[in-house]
Amino acid sequence: MVGDVLKRVTLSAPGRVSGSQNACPWGSCMLPGRTKDRWNHSREAARESPSPHGQTMALLGRKKTTIGLDIGSGLVKVAVIDHGRGEPELTRVAIVPLLADAIVEGEIMDPGIVAESVRAALSATGVKTRTVVTAVGGRDVIIKKIQIDRVKEQQARELIRWEAEQHVPFDMESVELDFQILDPDAEGLEMSVLLVAAKRDLIESKMRMLADADVTPNTVDVDAFALHNAFEVNYPDAMTGVVCLLNIGHEVTNINIMDDGVPLLSRDITVGTRRFREDLQRERGLSADEADALLQGYDRSPHLDAVIESRGEELAVGIERAAAFLASSSRNVNKLTAIYTCGGGSRVPGLTESLAARLGLHVEQANPLQRLRVRDGAFDSLVIDDVAPLLMLPIGLALRQAA
């Protein structure tokens, strides 16, 4: 099972790989694993890790409360989870809108505005701590399952940098690397390794913005792994076979393909609810408010169906290309069997049905609250059915029982 082999790991310092003695100065990045396996995890030995502000931060045991911070192109979302009662419980949710173009295609254009929205979202939760779990993603993050000669983990640490040069289209001097052996107890001459690489500039930009917001990241995760964690907790039966988790955001859609619960491929396409809204305005003559009302409503309409036909085709083609690439690059990957949607775009009336008809697959809107305990009052004045699809990523981050 994936949870038995994907353990907590620490992304390396510049020029090193996972497991080196010099810990990465911006925190830690964790590969996915069964969150429920960590509910009763024994406490790790106390260790020290430098904070992004240059101060030493003692990490003693595990915190009972984790704050997941998801900074999207249109919204800042915060989920707070209490881990102190035997199983995770969602205790608070806050969502704050971002001004238009503060973030464009994942790039922070106005750090001041973003920092202010982050502060407002955290304040709305009523939680005093400013230590969070956040994530990076996009085209500057590479996730790939590779095969290497079967060696012991210490030898793998020495080999992984050379292996990464064969698979990662980045300058190795400008990235952080991490890896996890997926089949440590198997036999054979080769072993499967999940390789992760993230551009250092991406991480440092995120860290600077968080520092401006007076926020300390305890953990820096990867978007695809956080989505995986929330999905796994709520849909354990989907951890077999090849499935796609489609996160449709404001500007970008993340395509994440998993095989038996292991994330194998993550790629972005620049289609999101913003494109849907612009099409409704330009092609159907609707105002911005009218377009938003259709996109966030519950009923289909001829205007919306026309836009879904074109934009839905882009999403379908993106999924097909990702699945085809995975099939061509991996010897033992089966065909895609199901698609689960999340993110704000998953609420668009008729989109799920359109994708199912176009791809000939089971397509379902994923609910990050399906099996998660929710405390009374967690959503305050928010309408649960409206905001739940937005929360897969921040809940996945908060499910990390951070050190």
Image (cartoon, rainbow, N blue to C red):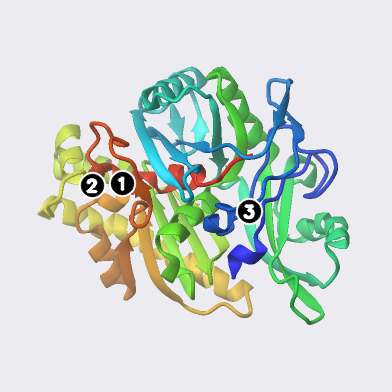
Q: Local crowd at mark 2 within 10 Å, few (<14), some, or many (≥20)?
A: few
Give 184 or 107, whichever is nearer the viewer: 184
Callout 1–callout 2 Cβ contact below 8 Å: yes
Give 86 or 22, whichever is nearer the viewer: 86
In the displayed structure, would residue 34 be above or below residue 62?
Answer: below
Q: Local crowd at mark 1 within 10 Å, few (<14), some, or many (≥20)?
A: many
Mark 3 residue type: Leu
Q: Quadrant of the C terminus?
A: top right
Mark 1 residue type: Ala
CA–CA distance in space, label 1 to label 2 = 6 Å
**In the rendered image, which residue does mark 3 sit on?**
31
Which label is found at residue 90?
none
Disc on the earlier residue, 1 or 3: 3
Q: Position of residue 74 (x, y in %)?
A: 37, 34
Disc 1 secondary structure class:
helix
| 198 displayed left or right of 188 | left
Looking at this rendering, what residue extends furthest in the front direction?
Answer: 85
**In the rendered image, which residue does mark 2 sit on?**
385
Mark 2 residue type: Asp
Q: Is residue 176 visible?
A: yes
Callout 3–callout 2 Cβ contact below 8 Å: no
Q: Residue at x 51, y 36 (%)?
A: 65
Q: Residue at x 77, y 43 (%)?
A: 12
Give 312 or 177, whichever is nearer the viewer: 177
CA–CA distance in space, label 3 to label 2 = 30 Å
**In the rendered image, which residue does mark 1 sit on?**
388
CA–CA distance in space, label 1 to label 3 = 24 Å
Residue 91 picture quarter: top left
| 363 displayed left or right of 327 | left
Q: Residue at x 62, y 52 (%)?
A: 41
Disc 2 secondary structure class:
helix
Disc 3 secondary structure class:
loop
